[in-house]
Image (tube, rainbow, N blue to C red):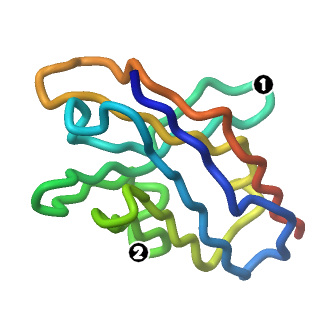
Amino acid sequence: QVQLVESGGGLVQAGGSLRLSCAASGRTRSTSIMGWFRQAPGKEREFVARITWSDGSTSYADSVKGRFTISRDNAKNTVYLQMNSLKPEDTAVYSCAARSPSATRYPYWGQGTQVTVSS
């Protein structure tokens, strides 16, 4: 099993920044890909970004490219999501997730952290 715990959410004004953290524990060697997702009220959950533990390769949703940066600290088993130039439409519950390279779905999820961007 893998446990994921997010932190760093909060209320910020439009144009501001937040950094989310996702601490992983347990059998983390089985999950080499970490992702961030978000779900706004009344909307489906959507992909935000992902990173590979081994080489740090990243991928982003078009809606956050150039504003969000995903990174990892292998020594701390922690993945970060630096969010800059936040917009009201970024308001959502942000969750991190983990999967193995061969998996098509993310079986491990954190509890989520609320990000609210005021206009």
Q: Secondary structure at mark 2?
A: loop
Query: What x and y, as percent, mark residue 63?
Result: 48, 56
Q: Nearer the viewer, residue 101 or 64?
A: 101
Q: Nearer the viewer, residue 58 or 112?
A: 112
Image height check: is 85 above or below 28?
below
> Image point 37% across, 23% down: which residue?
106
The amino acid type, in three-letter code, at marker 2 is Gly
Q: Secondary structure at mark 1?
A: loop
Q: Total number of numbered labels?
A: 2
Image height check: is 2 above or below 95?
above
Please state if 48 lies on the left or on the right of 43 as rendered. Answer: left
Query: What x and y, as percent, mark residue 102?
Result: 11, 22
The amino acid type, in three-letter code, at marker 1 is Gly
Please state if 79 lies on the left or on the right of 95 as rendered. Answer: left
- Whole-Å distance between the Cαs marked 2 and 1? 26 Å
Q: Nearer the viewer, residue 115 or 54?
A: 54
Crowd tier of the residue under label 2, counting other residues whose Cα lies within 10 Å: few below 14, some 14–19, many 20 or above? few
**Residue linked to disc 2:** 66
Q: Which mark is residue 42?
A: 1
Q: Check if mark 2's residue and mark 1's residue have beta carbons within 8 Å.
A: no
Which of the two discs, 2 and 1, labels the residue nearer the N terminus? Answer: 1
> Image point 23% across, 18% down: which residue?
104
Q: Quadrant of residue 45?
A: top right
> Image point 88% across, 70% down: which residue?
119
Image height check: is 103 above or below 56?
above
Please state if 26 lies on the left or on the right of 87 as rendered. Answer: left
Query: What x and y, as percent, mark residue 27?
Result: 31, 31
Q: Nearer the viewer, residue 38 or 95?
A: 95
Crowd tier of the residue under label 1, counting other residues whose Cα lies within 10 Å: few below 14, some 14–19, many 20 or above? few
Query: What x and y, as percent, mark residue 57?
Result: 16, 60
> The N terminus is located in which quarter?
top left
Q: Which mark is residue 105?
A: none
